[in-house]
Image: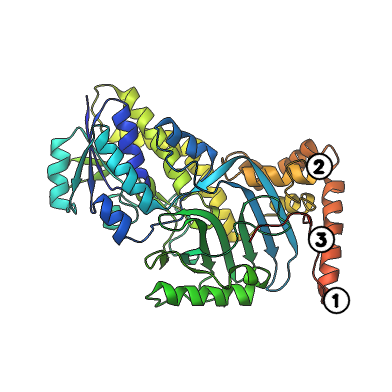
Amino acid sequence: MRSIAIIGSGQAGLLAAHGLLKGGNRVTLYSDRSPEQWLNESKPTGTATRFDMALQFEHELGLGSWENDAPWGDGAHITLCPAPGNRMLTVSGRLKRPFLAIDLRLQSHSWMHELVKRGGRLEIENVSLARLEQIAAEHDLTVIATGRGDMCRLFERDAARSVYDKPKRHLAMVCIKGPAMGFDGIPLLPVKHNVIAGVGEGFWVPYYHKDAGASWNLVFEAIPGGPMDRFEGITTGDQLLEIVKGVVRDFMPWDYEWMKNSELSDRLGWQVGKFSPTVRKPVGRLESGRLVACLGDTAMSLDPIGGQGANNGNKMVRNFVECVAAHGEQPFDAEWMTNTFERFYARHGYSTYTANNMLLEGPTSAVKDLLFAQYGSDGRFDNYSGPQLLANAFVENSNDPAQLLPMFQDRRKMHQFIEKVTGRSWIRAVASGAMGVAKAEFRQWRGLEPRHPVVPAFRVAA
């Protein structure tokens, strides 16, 4: 049995602890807070939306405790605006298998107790660098999974891979209760995206809250210095909720009635902040010369715009657990740490980081062709039209960003993909969607509602 220490009790650290424990290793998890402190005294560290590929690993480890109670999401509904007030087009796509977003405070509380029950060790302490030296000396392998905290400095920024050196968005997140669990005319429970060029993005995520149960987690991404950049200096959840209600009223008024009477799910259920999406080198060297590895946001931090942070972490942890198992009794040296990360980066990390960053920059020409060709999608489960199949594929890419990234980067490949999916020439597919978009644009020019595709018979219970 190998002796492995994990520093950090968030998504990646706990999942790694359970995976390594199941693999027959002796695992000690070091957490800066107890399970009860996680549950009752902490802010959520993120929304942690997970799609099927990431969820499967949790299921294999027996960690899906909320499946019967949590709201399972079916897909995504996206409204794209080239300017404030102009709802140019919509996308309504279904996933092959649903997604979940669980309050990380509830999850850490549960998974920590379960780790001890299964034979892992739990130490509650705030690990300093001096203490980290002792821990590393006592274990065969020490892993840092503390998110974007101070221990990130142990791992050098990978300048060749890290595209940005400053934040691309100023962020806000708030847990709310009150709004209906769905939207009239949209026949699925979606992540609802509103994308306003030059302003930012808003995402409404079906969420399982530790107290409120089925509810919503709202994420706002403001372009720095833009008209939605209103989150600086916020000190309370009530203050943030009033500001985001104003943001929705001003830039996404079609959703204002849905959320205007919402309340905080709990007094700590909010966050504001900003950071630069970063890839770090996977080997940390302590003053003694001992080595430590990294996982999750400590290794790669992604902007929340694509909902990929927890998904990327789960895939990284699965890869890490597999590589530990394959390594046998050999030492966990710098070469092993590097090769382990490179194995993950080749399969998932590059495509996830690249596709996620593309969302920060706006659609490429290839993506624009796809968005026009899918126009007409309405999200019905029995809709097998070409536009609906394209919308489904676009949304399914959140599960595995490697699937469509080559098409996003190469317009010729995108045209071939459109033709394969729709069975018609890409020119006709794009032109047909563009005609529908033009009709909606003309209606808005006349001061009317755009009449984007919906299912009028679908109504959500209050």
Estimate the spatial distance between the alpha carbons at disc 3 and disc 1, rounded to whole Å. Answer: 14 Å
Query: Can you tell which mark lies on residue 385?
Result: 2
Q: Circle 3: is it few (<14), some (14-19), or many (20+) Cα within 10 Å?
A: many
Q: Position of residue 324 (x, y in %)?
A: 32, 28
Could you tell whether 308 is left or right of 136 in the image?
A: right
**Residue bearing the label numbered 1:** 446
Question: For the N terminus, which image quadrant?
Answer: top left
Q: Secondary structure at mark 2?
A: loop
Q: Position of residue 159 (x, y in %)?
A: 41, 52
Amino acid tagged 2: Ser
Q: Secondary structure at mark 3?
A: helix
Q: How is the image coloured?
A: rainbow
**Residue at (61%, 38%) from the top-left corner?**
403
Report the mark closest to the observer, 2 or 3: 2
Query: Which of 311 and 217 lies nearest the eye of the viewer?
Result: 217
**Residue at (38%, 68%) from the top-left corner?**
267
**Residue bearing the label numbered 3:** 437
Q: Considering only vertical position in the picture, is 294 above or below 268?
A: above
